[in-house]
Image: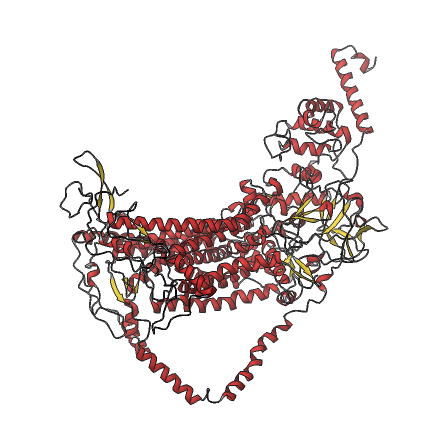
Amino acid sequence: MSDNFEVPKALTGTGAWLDDRFHGARGVRVLMRKVFPDHWSFMLGEIALWSFVILLLTGTFLSLFFVPSMNDVVYHGSYVKLDGIKMSEAYQSTLNISFDVRGGLLMRQIHHWAADLFMASLIIHMLRVFFTGAYRKPREINWLIGIGLFTLGLLEGLFGYSLPDDQLSGAGLRILEGVLQGIPIVGTYLAFFLFGGGFPGNVIVPRLYILHVFLIPGILLALITAHLFIMFHQKHTQMPAKGNTEKNVVGAPFFPYFLAKGGAWFFFIFAALVLLATFAEINPLWLYGPYTPLAISSASQPDFYMGLLEGSLRIMPAWEINGFGHTLTLSVLIPALLPLGLVLGGAAAWPFFEQWATGDKAFHNINDRPRNAPVRTATGMATITFYGVMWAEGANDVIADKLQIPLYTITWIARVMIFVGPAIAFFVTKRICLGLQRKDNETLLHGYESGIIRQLPNGEYIEVHRPVNEEARAVLEAKRPTALMPGSGSEDENGIPAPSSKGLLGKARVRANRAFAETVVLESDGHGHGNGHEEIEAGDEHPVGAGQLPAGDAAEEDTGSRGL
Amino acid sequence: MSDIEETDGSEGAEVASGPVAPHRVIGTPPPAPRLLGGGTEPAAAGSESAVSSESAGGVAVADHDEELRQPTEAEIQRGNRAEKVVVACFVIAFLAGCGFIAAYIGLPVGLDRLGPGGSTLDAALRSNLALGTSLSVALLALGLGALLWVRLLMPEVEIVEERHELQSAPADRAAFAETFKQGAGYSQFVKRPLVRRSLILGTLPLVAAPLVLLRDMGPLPGTSLRHTVWSPGRRLLVYGTNTPITPADFSAPGSMITIVPEGYEDDPDALVKAGVILIKFRPGELDIPVRTQGSTLVGTMNWTVDNIVAYSKICTHIGCPVALYEQTTHHILCPCHQSTFDASTGATVIFGPAARPLPQLPMTVNTDGYLVAKSDFTQPVGPSFWERG
Amino acid sequence: MSWINARRRRPVAGYAALVLGLVVVGLLYGAFTRSSGSAQASSPPASQSDINTGKDLFDATCSSCHGLDAQGTSQGPSLIGAGAAAVNFQVSTGRMPAKEVGAENERKPPVFNAQQIAELGDYVASLGGGPTVPDAQQVATSGANTALGEQLFSANCAQCHGFAGAGGALTYGKDAPPLTEASPTQIYEAMLTGPEAMPVFGDGSINPSAKRDIIAYIVATRKEPNPGGFSLGRTGPVTEGLVVFLGGMGFLVIIAMWITYKRRDPRPQGTE
């Protein structure tokens, strides 16, 4: 239906005025027609984006009332239970915000929930990007920016919840100082420089404040802008579907569809955060009390996104090396640096490792289905298991209390599972992926089970199978198995061979390549072995190409299969 | 006998009615019942209204879409019904937003505004509930309205946009290289290595300068980590009440209390190293062997008084107060990372990441009968550090 | 004739004489036996009949583990010197009589009523003294200094019982119970007697006034509402993290699926 309406003079006038100065007509028109593919999992990064915006808004409100000072005052405010207690101005101003400023408690809670949601959505978003292979060329830089955003988010959250100088976050700062202090050679200097002397001193809160409200948000904002711009410029990836190719983007135009859906999404995210802030209390620091160095509570944990570090500190046995007048405190350094370093470093290196192992230098704009990349998916699940075990160990005293499991038992279980768990997860996930690939192939060849039972003249009952339609077929066929590199390594486009596959690195590469290339290949003639499908084992001479069905496969007759 | 059926729509009752595809496009949920019992049919001819020409930027923009066909009567009805729903959502948002402002104005918080007899927490709860509920209703209504607007009022349009090659054409790359070489040539950056190197030399100190400027962020640690404020004769005070304590005051076996040094009761910088945990044992239960570290005495029964022992309260792992004392097992447990120390044998480590026992405070009784320190700790307290040794 | 002589032969005279005799003996007994040791809660001296009833109760219920003279057996420790406060705490919280030997005893409905508990306490106190049950004055929370209570609680109690008294884990399967149900008297007695793994906080280290402040702090904390919404257990960031993942992300993922779901075009896509 064509809408016959006049664009109001105000809009056309403004548009012309701007265009006179910025030459925008063509570019903005392109923007209006820009296509954003529509899949629910593509909206996870936006949760982080809008949470960040909400953090900026609520944070600005809080900064109007918060006093970043560690000077001592005696409290005589509205929360009479603490009347007469000595506390820092930071803590007092936070009590003030919670109890004397209208909307203050709500803003504080929205702010804290938004920080948690920001980190949670970042984790889920990173996992989505990982499992669909959306970090591959040309998006490696964006992946690295994303990891940078995550790391900065960790720090930002840590500094943020340490600002009110309460008992819980003060204990966290003490742990930060203890870890810094343990760093070889420069540790004590770093600790004394950061805290302006011994712990706690009286400068850490103002220093963290300026990091938290100015420096890190500035860097975050710049990185987020870069992240979005790159995504904009390269266009978003797409899920495999009929009509989606490596060379196009299919969806609804930005104006008005994506604008409206994006706006709706922003309101839903904001609403979710306000609902949490209304009905779920977070960080009730009037119950924690002001920070004092000799008090501590059971169930002292940092916010969940620091859980990996907390768990790794708890899981560690007591290892320390003393010699030549120096101490190397491994029971602090290893947990603080190794697990998080492994996870983040591994994530950062992964796109390049995968390229190295698969020799895949092509552009990828269509996402992988996780089952079609078994080694990647299995590695991801192993990492999740590793992360999850540490995370649970970080809450071990809460688990011990609520589930009545002895405390040391949990730690011992974690010490074992941290090695065994990822190995099991890797193996099981890989087998599941290959199994799912087999199922896909069966469906392609023999059709789907229609649920209709038919009795044959000879009395036998069979279930009728129907061939899948084109849309489903496009998805099932969207598989690009890794090419097996012949023993000597791959060649670049000018025909110059890469360094030989001899040597430790070369051999490792060949082995990695074989692991990545393991896949279930569709055989066109079906029968023969078991369910009729071959697995290409390592050592096969024929590199596997893209899974293409021979023509005419759609309606195959297959007497033997029950399709079960 | 084939067990695969062709579905050509001509079969009768056996054919599953409705959509043909049994397997979902991966990642999208199964065909859901229509929202609110009806929506607009795809008014555009689906993906057929796709791209036509390629513009210069490589982004295909249709010069004109196929005309969306005229809506049917039923579709117009559905659209009008949907419009009512969307409008209702926005009206609810308006009312809730007004409610938010009313709640802000009408619900006071803080004793200053509540007046005498007011309950701070009840007022805060009321205000938070009212403000939060109205705000979330407003936001949900706006989101819902916007979403229903897109799904129910806007026609379904799908367009296809071409991705342009990210890689520049070889000619462009060559031209780039050429221009770069030309510019570099003009600058003589390559031709005159002395200029280049002296530039780098000239900027090096300025690069280091910001790091140098950070020096005054804090004092050098020196030996401050090796000492606490405990000194000979300094009395042990109960933390909080700041009262001195005699062995008779602390006579019940299984007693435990947090101790601070006299003169530094309110000084967190001192307390973070000088905090002490005092424990009373039954006769015969306390057995601290004589321990030395190098030539320094670090543990002995001589530093106890009447089966009362004083240990540093600062965990030797990372410095949390190690406070959890179980009198039945005489274990001291640190709640941060579960380092566990056996208080009856000199706070030796029995579990957890702490690598060293808690330092023992040399303790005795002064002439007035109060517990006092004999001297400072004989080893650094708290977390390990490089220079500790 | 004197007033007493005129009523000497009445039936009630005998009972009056008996009561008088008991009172005198009780007073004498109370005057000559004193509870031992350092600063204690003061309480009225127990009467001999109370002690006797207490002994009967004790023999019936407690002696199997604690011995007929409360001297202890392999099943239970000696109660000589434990004091009425310990008895009152253990029995009024239902921890004693114990469910099992050796297990950590948890609060359960008490078996004895207040009168019986007092008698048990009197009997045990008669064996060897020990801390006495605090009187109402000592556990009154009005006018107490909750600020000092917060300081003392957070330095000596929170590491086991949690910053808001929600409880916490100890080693080897034990736990420090939540403080939501204990009465002020029971809290006082627990501090004074150090039940099971809990250390003793005698009056020499935490004096009675400070104990009052701690009790006032605990009572105020557990009574006060949660202005931010549901408390999520008052255990800190662990439950908050669970809620943000399951509640926040879960809700939003469902909304995202709703926003993007594709209506399947029912028209056939051509022939298969």
Residue C11's image quarter?
top right
In this rendering, the answer to whether B65 lies above or below B138 is below
Q: Residue C164: horizontal and vertical position, in percent?
A: 59, 46
Which part of the image, by quadrant, shows the N terminus of chain B? top left
- Determine the residue located farthest toward the top in the rendered image: C9
Q: Residue B380: horizontal and vertical position, in percent?
A: 72, 59
Image-based side of A405 in relation to A472, left or right: right
Can residue A176 be seen in the rendering of this structure? yes
Q: Residue B265: horizontal and vertical position, in percent?
A: 72, 56
Q: Nearer the viewer, residue B343 or A267?
A: B343
Which part of the image, by quadrant, shows the C terminus of chain B? bottom right
Q: Nearer the viewer, residue B375 or B269?
A: B375
Residue visible at 29% across and 68% down in the picture: B163
Image-based side of B204 in relation to B106, left or right: right
Q: Nearer the viewer, residue B90 or A447?
A: A447
Q: Residue A207: horizontal and vertical position, in percent?
A: 58, 66
Can residue A57 be seen in the rendering of this structure? no
**Way the structure is coloured:** secondary structure
Q: Nearer the viewer, residue A547 or A256?
A: A547
Residue A563's image quarter?
top left
Count the numbered circles shown: 0
In this rendering, the answer to whether A139 lies above or below B134 is below
- Determine the residue located farthest toward the left in the rendered image: B10
